[in-house]
Image (cartoon, rainbow, N blue to C red):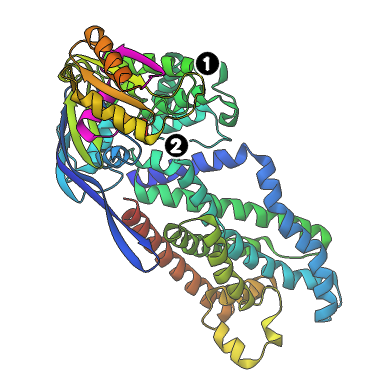
Amino acid sequence: MIEARGLRKSYRTRRGRKVTSVEAVRGVDFAVQRGEIFGFLGPNGAGKTTTLRMLATLIRPDGGDATIAGVDLRHAPAQVRQRIGFVAQTSGTYDQSNARRDLVHQARMCGVSKSTAKSLAEAAIVAFQLEGFADRRIGTYSGGQRRRLDVALGVIHSPQVIFLDEPTAGLDPPSRARMWQEVRRLRDEGMTIFLTTHYLDEADALCDRISIIDVGLIVAEGTPSDLKREISGDVVVVDLAAPDTAGAPEPATMLEASKILAEQPCVYSCEAIDHTLRLYVDSGATAMPQIIRALSNKGIEPGAIETRRPSLDDVFLAKTGRTLAD
Amino acid sequence: MKLARDTWLTFQYEVGQLVHNPVSIAITLLQPLTYLAFFTPFLKSVMGVSTYSDAYQVYVPSLFCAMGLFSGMYAGFALLAAMRKGVITRFRVTPLSRVGLLLGRELMTVVLIGFQALVVTVAALVLGLRVPVANLLFALVLLSMMVLLGVSISYALALFVPNENTLVNLVNGVAQPLALLAGVLIPLSVAPLWVRDVALWNPFAWGANGMRAIFLGHIGTQVVWQASLILTGLAVVAVVLSSRLFSREIA
């Protein structure tokens, strides 16, 4: 449904007299199948939004090309617009307007007649449960209500593909859960969904497949479970902050502990993040006693220690050497 | 055909936003009405005209020009605000014609300022202005051309500045000299000759002169058709250029 090949985009920024070129997206390839929820996971500034804006015909790629719903992005952006919906990160509605008026107008912009637009708006109000406030000023909506309206506007013409930029950024947990439901409902109705997110749990729980993007390049692609399976075994997290003082450990202690633990035969690799060490091991249950013993032999007392299954953050760490939480 | 439909659609939507906010319209009426009430008596004594009717005959056309120029030039802020809100982005990811999107907004401003001009005229009529209906209609057409010119300049500026602060300075820097050189605050007749020569290059000065002639009842005079020709020509060019710019900058 979406196929991107070598998409590139750089921006020129001017600081004083110096003009520098920032490569926001440095050649990304991916393919999205019909009827799947495809996520772009990455930290802020990774190039997610730039990629999305290129696909939504808002900015011209510097290089590469893409096909969306069978239409070439570079040569027929107008036809692409007829087949897609787009929901930006910033809302895109006037505070003084209301949901019904905007929905009717949005449908009219997509080319339908006035009466069709009215019935489409009515259907959207029901589908997205906007009944309670559809005729009220948008300025009075809650964050979740506003976001539901944004998505309703984006899909009013039943596009084949919908682009969602950070659909749940800034929403409270119940509103997020509700938005996930809406997105799944759209997929079940046959829409193809392309979304960006910097939330690990969102990528994990909502997306059928994800691409992990960092500094403008795709570093991993697959289903969330396949990606996590690539990190075989368990993760042991050792917190070196002393339990009684809650203070950060000495840098020297951190260094020594990570050196000792990296030498342990059961530990594949060891990453230091703030005052914790993240150890990748075959089995957490058998590695934990060895880790504790090795540390206490050198007189280091860990504040806390836990073992867990690998998360997408571990995938990101393995691919980029950094964590998404930064 | 599609352009006409999309322009109409945008126009309708933007006018709808205005109509549902009568307070914001009332606020835009405040300045012209205060000027009408307080500036005219001041002008009357300065110009030494005998009656209020005469004073309004001279000042109302100037006020029309000032409204056309300033309200037109400030339209860029609404565009910038809509862009910041993401409204323009949302519109752009639909098959809506880009030129229609801009033109619909420009026409909304024309209608808004036309409405203001009507309110001002009604107030002035009550205070003693006398003007034939045909002349008033002609003046409104001339005003529309000024608005289109002002809005197009303002939109072009708005597309090139990073934020509202820069736009304020830029718009003031352009609009104030244009207003001064159009003689809407101080009549150009008291200006030195070289200033009047400079003013010959200001389309709004032509507009002001033409507008005054229309209100004085001299609708067939040279200055009226010259002003109409210059302003219509420039308005068309400005609208075309700004739509081109708009389509290129944010295609």
Residue B132 position by quadrant:
bottom right
Q: Quadrant location of residue A311? A: top left
> In the rendering, which numbered label is found on residue A90?
2
Nearer the viewer's eye, disc 1 or disc 2? 2
- Chain under label 2? A
Disc 2 element:
loop
Name the chain under label 1: A
Q: Which residues are magenta?
A: A300-323
Check whether the beta carbons of the residues at disc 1 and disc 2 lie within 8 A of each other: no
Q: Is residue B195 above or below residue B126?
A: below
Give coordinates of residue A302: x percent, y percent: 38, 19
What label does residue A180 carry, if any? Answer: none
Does B12 appear above or below A16?
Answer: above
Quarter of the figure that contains the C terminus of chain A: top left
Left or right position of B44 against A127: right
- The residue located at (79%, 68%) in the rendering is B39
Residue type (three-letter) at the residue carrying disc 1? Glu
- Whether discs 1 and 2 lie on one chain: the answer is yes
Q: Secondary structure at mark 1?
A: helix
From what the image shows, is residue A303 above or below residue B47? above
CA gap, disc 1 to disc 2? 23 Å
Mark 2: amino acid: Thr
Answer with left or right where residue A289 lies relative to residue A167: left
* The N terminus of chain A: image quadrant: top left
Q: Residue at x 37, y 13 (%)?
A: A181
Task: Judge whether A281 appears above or below A87 on screen.
Answer: above
Give the crowd class for mark 1: few <14, some 14-19, many >=20 residues within 10 Å. some
Say which residue label 1 marks.
Answer: A131
Q: Residue at x 56, y 25 (%)?
A: A141
- Whether residue A69 is visible: no
Where residue A12 appears, as percent x and y from the top left, is: 30, 58
